[in-house]
Amino acid sequence: MGLPFIDLAAQQARIRQDVDQRIAAVLSHGAYILGPEVKELEVALAERSGATHVISCSSGTDALVLALLGLGLRPGQGVIVPSFTFAASAEAMAVLGSVPVFAEIERSTYNLDPDGLPSALAAAHAQNIEVVGIMCVGLFGQPADITRISAFADKHGLWVLDDAAQSFGSTWKGRQAGTLGRVTATSFFPAKPLGCYGDGGAVLTNDDSIAKIAVSCRVHGQGRDKYENERIGMTARLDTIQAAILLSKLSIFDDELAARQQVADQYETLLGGKVTTPLLAADATSSWAQYVIQLPDGADRQAIQDRMGSKNIPTAVYYPRPMHTQPPYLHYPVAQDGLSVTERLASSVLALPMHPYLTPEQQEQVADALMSSL
Ligand SMILES: *Cc1c(COP(=O)(O)O)cnc(C)c1O
């Protein structure tokens, strides 16, 4: 049997008894929707991150939509977003009738390039689109350069929404993801660093008014009670059972983050100088959602993946097609200087197995298979 790309079974074996007990407790009290575990989780995540408000919800995508509703984003308004990201980042604004404005990333960190922001803003203005905010993404676990992105945002009167679906657990200058932008969205999809056993997500913010709107929109825009509808919302609650599972996973999260850092360090030892390994910014720690290398120019990625696959080493590509090249997004503005770094990375990145339970021996197998497949 080959080694797994992400090993959720090893994690489950570690916490199975606790998870079983917590699920049994939910079955006993029967409050399946917004039960006590949901509140307990929100309090625990607030304590962990330092965010005043944590609003759990049904997915990372819904967390992004709730955050955008909380920010008061209106149809036709533009939001700067990287093109090199998971579809949900740009989709969340597009589904609200707003306009993703695609910006360039840094080659070294894969994250929004602060130097590329003026070119994205100019592209929107050239089409008479009013830009109101920036969505940065902590891709592969590392937060974007929030210091410089916030400075640009402040100068232009924009808000910053941090898509931390992959980067919850990371820090920037010692501050936890969840407090870096005006509002943060994260995901508890099973394969994320902190995942449940289904779909889930959360909105984190210190802003009372964003929190109030997110709480309301999570349940059909409810007001003081269920049958008073103050605004148009959605149904976007986190299941109590998923909150119970997350409480169990949260108890080992810091330990797993440390293990992921060790795995990343070991990869750097094995591969540094041979392929382009991921770079952490000096101000960042990463939750290492993925370990993504860059293949040499001209390398045949598919052939390398096939050769590694034949040695039972799974690999993946995040993301082969940038958002601005996907049919439903073709008409949205793209930074005036173009997105050459984005396009180059889309064809050269390769994700290696990454999870907290990867052993040094398994990593050697991965490295050997990679080096002999290049
Ligand atoms: C996974 C992910 C999302 C969406 O989360 P879901 O829980 O799958 O809806 C959003 N943005 C990024 C960057 C992601 O990786």
Image (spheres, rainbow, N blue to C red):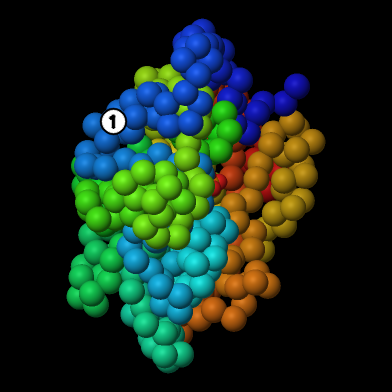
- Asked which quadrant contains residue 359, the reply is top right
Which amino acid is tagged 1?
Val
Residue tagged by mark 1?
43
Residue 30 placement, left or right of 180: right
Mark 1, secondary structure of its residue: helix
Where in the figure is residue 357, as x and y percent of width and height?
52, 22
Please give the name of the residue rendered at 24% of the width and 64% of the height, measured from the top-left corner: 150
Whether residue 34 is situated above or below residue 145 in the rendered picture: above
- Asked which quadrant contains residue 157, the reply is bottom left
Where in the figure is residue 108, as x and y percent of width and height?
42, 58
Residue 190 placement, left or right of 114: right
Please give the name of the residue rendered at 67% of the width and 26% of the height, measured from the top-left corner: 3
Please give the name of the residue rendered at 57% of the width and 59% of the height, measured from the top-left corner: 87
Please give the name of the residue rendered at 75% of the width and 32% of the height, measured from the top-left corner: 311
Q: Quadrant of the N terminus?
A: top right
Where in the figure is residue 73, as x and y percent of width and height?
38, 69
Residue 49 placement, left or right of 100: left
In this view of the protein, which residue sits in the foreground, 168 or 20?
20
Asked if the residue at label 1 sits under 8 Å from ligand 1, the reply is no
Q: Is residue 288 visible?
A: yes
Whether residue 11 is situated above or below residue 21 in the rendered picture: below
Where in the figure is residue 112, as x and y percent of width and height?
40, 63
Q: Is residue 141 visible?
A: no
